[in-house]
Amino acid sequence: MKKTSFLFLFTTFLVSSIYAQKQRVKFTNARDFDEKRYSEIKGSPYYFKDWVSSTIYATDHFVYENILINYNGHTQNFEATEGGKWIELNMDWIRRIEVKRKGNEKVFKTIEGEEVIFQRVLQPNFPDKFAVLLYEGKNIQLMQEWRVALSEKKVETPGKTDVFERFMAKKNHYLLKNGDLKPIKLKKKNLFQELGNAQKLEAFAKKEKIKFDSKQDLKRLLSYFEGLN
């Protein structure tokens, strides 16, 4: 599989010669990174607290390694940076992005697990193009829609109206089973009802002290479920 360097296939990139000549793709219109562009808004629109090194799998089967990226849940775009400049990735050219703990230990101090995977979801009833994979098994997948809404609060003061803005993360979960994608709440009753084998799952969850708000515990539970079939 062909591997290339940082210069990914961005919206503003010149890509006409990549197949014929296999050259590094040049880009234009990259913007200087402004750390204060969201300074007047409380909270953050980003999935990670800082840029993270990633591996990007493109729809043309090229693999791009060690790309510094972050996901902006407000614009719902991946952003990449190099040398103090940043650009938005062309989402149509991405099928999967993997971010490993190794090499990103500082950022992963507040993230559970050894990796974060963003996967394109080709399902007509999925509201967005990408989801965070919480579990990726042979027959089932548990995924999270992660987006950020901008909320406003108006405060009336004598002679003027002050508007305060805040980024609010929104999370929805979906279970893909036998090709059928359904929204699901990460509650014991809901999950067991959708999966089946409720009695065995109940016994396993009790024995293993499964916490349903833990990504690692959910992985253990779903792995056990797949082993029942």
Image: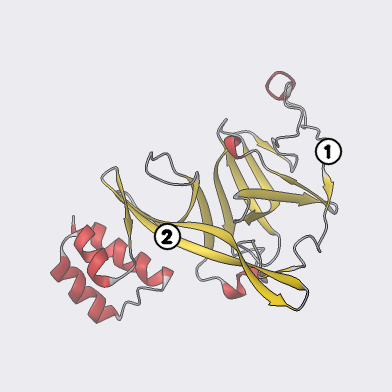
Name the spot of residue 215 as percent of width and height, x first.
Answer: 42, 68
Check disc 1 and give the amino acid type.
Answer: Asn
Front in this rendered view, residue 145 or 74: 74
Check disc 2 and give the amino acid type.
Answer: Asn
Q: Residue furthest front?
A: 159
Q: Quadrant of residue 70?
A: bottom right
**Residue 29 tag number:** 1
The answer to whether 178 is drawn above or below residue 9 in the figure is below
> Disc 2 on helix, strand or loop?
strand
**Residue 172 tag number:** 2
> Disc 1 on helix, strand or loop?
loop
**Label 1 crowd bin: few (<14), some (14–19), many (20+), radius 10 Å:** few
Name the spot of residue 8 as percent of width and height, x first.
Answer: 71, 39
Q: How many marks can you see?
A: 2
Front in this rendered view, residue 132 or 54: 132
Q: Quadrant of residue 56?
A: top right
Along the horizontal axis of the image, is 60 left or right of 188? right
The answer to whether 69 is drawn above or below residue 221 in the figure is above
| Residue drawn at point x = 69 percent, y = 35 percent | 9
Front in this rendered view, residue 41 or 9: 41
Q: Quadrant of residue 14?
A: top right
The C terminus lies in quadrant: bottom left
**Label 2 crowd bin: few (<14), some (14–19), many (20+), radius 10 Å:** some
The N terminus lies in quadrant: top right
**Residue 147 tag number:** none
What color scheme is it? secondary structure
- C-alpha gap between disc 2 and disc 1: 35 Å
| Residue drawn at point x = 60 percent, y = 40 percent | 91
Along the horizontal axis of the image, is 11 left or right of 130? right
| Residue drawn at point x = 67 percent, y = 75 percent | 155
Along the horizontal axis of the image, is 192 left or right of 186? left
